[in-house]
Amino acid sequence: MDIFSAASLTALLQVIAIDLVLAGDNAIVIGLAAAGLPAEQRKKAILVGVLAATVLRIGFAAVTVKLLAVVGLLLAGGILLLWVCWKMYRELRTSQADELEATEALSNADLNSDKKVAGKAKRKTLGQAALQIVVADVSMSLDNVLAVAGAARDHFPVLVIGLVLSIALMGLAATFIAKLLHRHRWIAYIGLLIILYVAVDMVYRGAMEVWPHVNNAVS
């Protein structure tokens, strides 16, 4: 089977690392949005976020795989993924205090022993938090699907495993991963490097794909 080839296993490891980091990143964004809500509304906002992320990942997966087969869009996807890397790098430099607020909101636990759960977050309504979460989910779900599709390349079983794992992590283990990334930042930086490698590889392959068409048009 293709899944057991060296190339497929390498792609699978890349996909797993991407899924872990982006699931945690997505969870922290959801937690930041939910942190400003009263305790009784936080669970509703987090549930909205996880469900929206799941639905969006499925929808984007169905479209993105076909779009990347169109000449020129692999290059465009690689460039977009480079921007994702820059955005993720900036997010990794988010203050520890903000990240702690998000992690407390996700786990509904007082992690810094100040007798409050996300007590320093700016107050907001459930509608404001839900809108903020869904808008963030659109961007982050597209990021995730692009990165997984780019890492999987032509290994369709790896692509399927990666997308299923992405959805499962968001639904079942997002809070745990967010806590893990909060405690061990180096894991997120390794994930960032892998996504950067995938982005550069997509740009290179996309450029090689587009160049003959550009060359023919010029000549």
Image (spheres, helix red, strand yellow):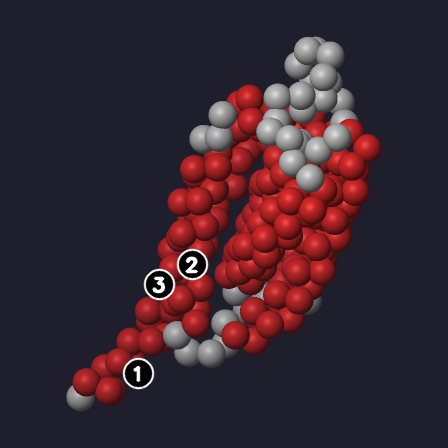
In percent of width and height, residue 2 lies at 64, 66
The disc label shown at residue 204, or none: 3
| Quarter of the rendering occupied by the N terminus | bottom right
Q: Nearer the viewer, residue 11 or 182?
A: 182
Residue 202 shows in the view: no
Residue at the spot 68% in from the left edge and 53% down from the top edge: 53
Q: Nearer the viewer, residue 90 or 115?
A: 115
Q: Earlier in the sequence, mark 2 or mark 3?
A: 2
Residue at the spot 58% in from the left edge and 49% down from the top edge: 136
| Quarter of the rendering occupied by the C terminus | bottom left
- The three-letter amino acid code for the residue at tag 1 is His
- The three-letter amino acid code for the residue at tag 2 is Leu
Q: Earlier in the sequence, mark 1 or mark 2?
A: 2
Asked if the residue at tag 3 contacts the one at tag 2, i.e. Cβ–Cβ closer than 8 Å, the answer is no
In percent of width and height, residue 214 lies at 26, 80
Which residue is tagged 1? 213
Q: Residues within 10 Å of mark 3 (few under 14, many from 20)?
A: some
